Image (cartoon, grey):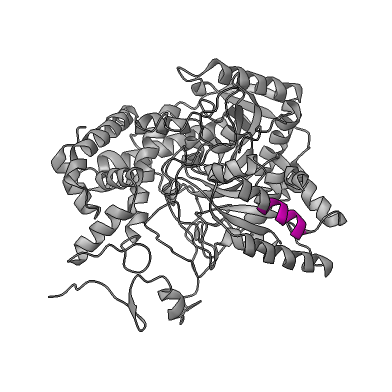
């Protein structure tokens, strides 16, 4: 049955529809793949019994002629999405056995459309990290290895479990979230497609909050079309999230394969950063050539405040996180460490429950919001954020979309950047601007580096212009003909 | 901007995180490293720029002031570290 786990989501849906196999068969094949792939540590929680129940219910719905858009497709869920009756950890000890009594809007829509849950995927603690190494449940190991070198590599982060599971054929697609690059960077590191939609496209209700003005859910998938199918189901207005946009969700998959002839594509000159590996530079040039051959006009644009995006992000995101994570006080749910007084109980619970990176960010956030520093740091960062967003508005007066590399390098080894927070933060240099401006951004696999590791290209669009990204992503996917898969070692 | 040990202790207290004494000096170095890197924001001309507080330009939506969901203490208390009846049990606050 191993071939069932090699299918794209589209092909699997076609096979289910034609009766070539049942959801139960498809789900069973994936459960076996998940169990065989435990060395990857991609799942925090496997839910095989629930998956089989959901698969049988799906087969029954299909037999009754009530098949939804994702009917019978087994998916992985990043363990940041609350799932009714299924433990949700956010990769942290502080949630200690928390079992939601409600379902996140995004996952409820996937189930509404017939999808099947295989389990909860590993992630950096509270989605704070770029390598999955901050997870309280241990790092995810990428299914990819450098040619002739068995060193364990990172799948990227924070959606490392999602990216690794999709790349290794453990699920047909996965949910993910992106606050500074957490969908796109892991997608680039694992040869998968990831899209962070426009801020407000997907409801944040029931998604454990990191930085509320930046967090967005999105899918990681094997193809551009699969990503479109998943995003379609995940999107839509939700009155329970006041920042959710009340706009129509177009048929995203219909954009895949459309001509991109005549589109103007911007190449931001500030993204040619010092020390960028020649291979990333060459890949970018290749992407430019592909889109030119597809009939696009390439235009150099300027986003002058690009270099200030990461430092601004490392004020805005920790500030929001310090506020959001104040809720973990050990009183109503999660870990409680007993101590003599109420304050000591708070302090001890939080000291035991949070990992080092989360603590660092809470402290930075508390510091920049504290009396005397608010104007100098937080308010200044919000103004720089406006400058960054204005740069994009100006560029989109001249071009329809932007093309950049997704990440400044291929996947690195676990442990390689772990001791230098700022070096780790630089992973998000090309992705974080999009979060600050609230724009849609997609990573598409475009090639392998000399050591056999995937590299991704990023497309950035105007607000709510995901459709165009699917057309452009489809054009790059077709030109790149990326079909490499990690050689199975697990 | 250098963050000293006293500042780390103060901020950790504000954040309600008990940092062990052995972590104070390392944290002071780590946070100073991060803040030094962030310092480059001082170069940006922000004269007359409105702070961007949201990525959504729409006004906050309003709804009718009515109860939509509730009356379900079992769901609310399902994850309580400690409970008695329909109440959360917390450490004593008033002497």
Name the dominant secondary structure of the magenta segment.
helix
Q: Is residue A268 left or right of residue A374?
A: right
Of A250 and A451, nearer the camera is A451
Query: Quick check: can you spot residue A249?
Result: no
| For residue A133, side relative to residue B20 (left or right) | right
- Where residue A74 sits, quadrant-wise, is bottom right
Q: Residue at x 45, y 17 (%)?
A: A274
Image position of A11 (left or right of A391): right
First to last magenta residue range: A23-31
**Is A177 above or below relative to A240?**
above
> Please, is residue A149 above or below residue A25 in the view?
above
Query: Does the image show residue A401?
Result: yes
Image location (x, y in percent) of residue A260: 75, 32
The residue lying at 25 percent from left, 53 percent from top is: B15
If the image is split into quadrants, where does the C terminus of chain A sit? Answer: top right
* A326 or A165, nearer to the observer: A165
Question: Depth check: B93 or A459 in front?
Answer: B93
Q: Is residue A201 above or below residue A481?
A: below
Q: Could you tell whether B93 is left or right of A64 in the image?
A: left
In x, y percent, where is residue A179?
Answer: 47, 44
């Amino acid at each position: 049955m191993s071939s069932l786990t090699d299918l794209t989501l589209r092909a699997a849906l076609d096979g289910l529809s034609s009766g070539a196999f049942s959801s139960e068969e498809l789900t069973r094949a994936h459960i076996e793949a998940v169990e065989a792939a435990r060395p990857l540590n991609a799942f925090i929680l496997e839910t095989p019994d629930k998956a089989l129940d959901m698969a049988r219910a799906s087969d029954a719905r299909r037999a009754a002629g009530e098949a939804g858009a994702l009917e019978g497709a087994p998916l992985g869920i990043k363990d940041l999405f609350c799932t009714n009756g299924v433990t949700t950890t956010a990769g942290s000890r502080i949630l200690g056995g928390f079992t939601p009594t409600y379902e996140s809007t995004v996952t409820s829509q996937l189930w509404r459309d017939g999808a099947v849950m295989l389990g909860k995927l590993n992630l950096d603690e509270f989605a704070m990290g770029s390598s999955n190494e901050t997870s309280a449940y241990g790092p995810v190991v990428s299914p990819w290895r450098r040619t002739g070198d068995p060193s364990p590599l990172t799948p990227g982060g924070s959606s490392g479990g999602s990216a690794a599971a999709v790349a290794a054929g453990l699920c047909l697609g996965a949910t993910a979230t992106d606050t500074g690059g957490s969908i796109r960077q892991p997608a680039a590191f694992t040869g998968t497609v990831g899209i962070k939609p426009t801020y407000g496209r997907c409801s944040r209700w029931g998604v454990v909050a990191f930085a509320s003005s930046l967090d967005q859910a999105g899918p990681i998938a094997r193809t551009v079309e699969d990503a479109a199918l998943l995003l379609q189901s995940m999107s839509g207005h939700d009155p329970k999230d006041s920042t959710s946009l009340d706009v129509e969700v177009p048929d995203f998959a219909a954009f895949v394969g459309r001509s991109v002839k005549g589109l103007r594509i911007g190449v931001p000159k500030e993204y040619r950063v010092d020390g960028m590996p020649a291979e990333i530079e060459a890949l970018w040039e290749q992407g430019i050539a592909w889109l030119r051959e597809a009939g696009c006009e390439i235009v150099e644009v300027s986003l002058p405040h690009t270099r200030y995006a990461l430092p601004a992000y490392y004020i805005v995101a920790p500030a929001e996180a310090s506020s959001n994570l104040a809720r973990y006080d050990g009183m109503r749910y999660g870990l409680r460490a007993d101590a003599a007084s109420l304050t000591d109980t708070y302090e001890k619970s939080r000291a035991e429950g949070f990992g080092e990176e989360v603590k660092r960010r809470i402290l930075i956030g508390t510091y920049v919001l504290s009396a005397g520093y608010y104007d100098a740091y937080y308010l200044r960062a919000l103004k720089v954020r406006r400058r960054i967003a204005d740069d994009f508005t100006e560029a989109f007066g001249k071009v329809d979309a932007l093309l950049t590399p997704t990440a400044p390098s291929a996947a690195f080894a676990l442990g390689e950047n772990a001791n230098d927070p700022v070096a780790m933060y630089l992973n998000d240099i090309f992705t974080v601007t999009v979060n600050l401006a609230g724009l849609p951004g997609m990573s598409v696999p475009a090639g392998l580096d000399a050591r056999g590791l995937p590299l991704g290209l990023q497309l950035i669009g105007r607000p709510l212009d995901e459709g165009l990204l699917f057309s452009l992503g489809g054009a790059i996917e077709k030109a790149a003909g990326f079909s490499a898969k990690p050689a199975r070692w697990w | 901007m250098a963050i000293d040990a006293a500042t780390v202790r103060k901020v950790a207290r504000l954040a309600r995180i008990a940092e062990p004494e052995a972590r104070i000096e390392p944290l002071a170095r780590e946070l100073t490293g991060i803040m030094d890197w962030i310092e480059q924001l001082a170069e940006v001309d922000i004269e007359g720029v409105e702070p961007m507080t949201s990525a959504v330009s729409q006004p906050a939506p309003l709804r009718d002031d009515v109860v939509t969901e509730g009356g379900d203490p079992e769901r609310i208390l399902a994850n309580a570290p400690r409970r008695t009846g329909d109440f959360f049990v917390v450490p004593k606050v008033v002497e």
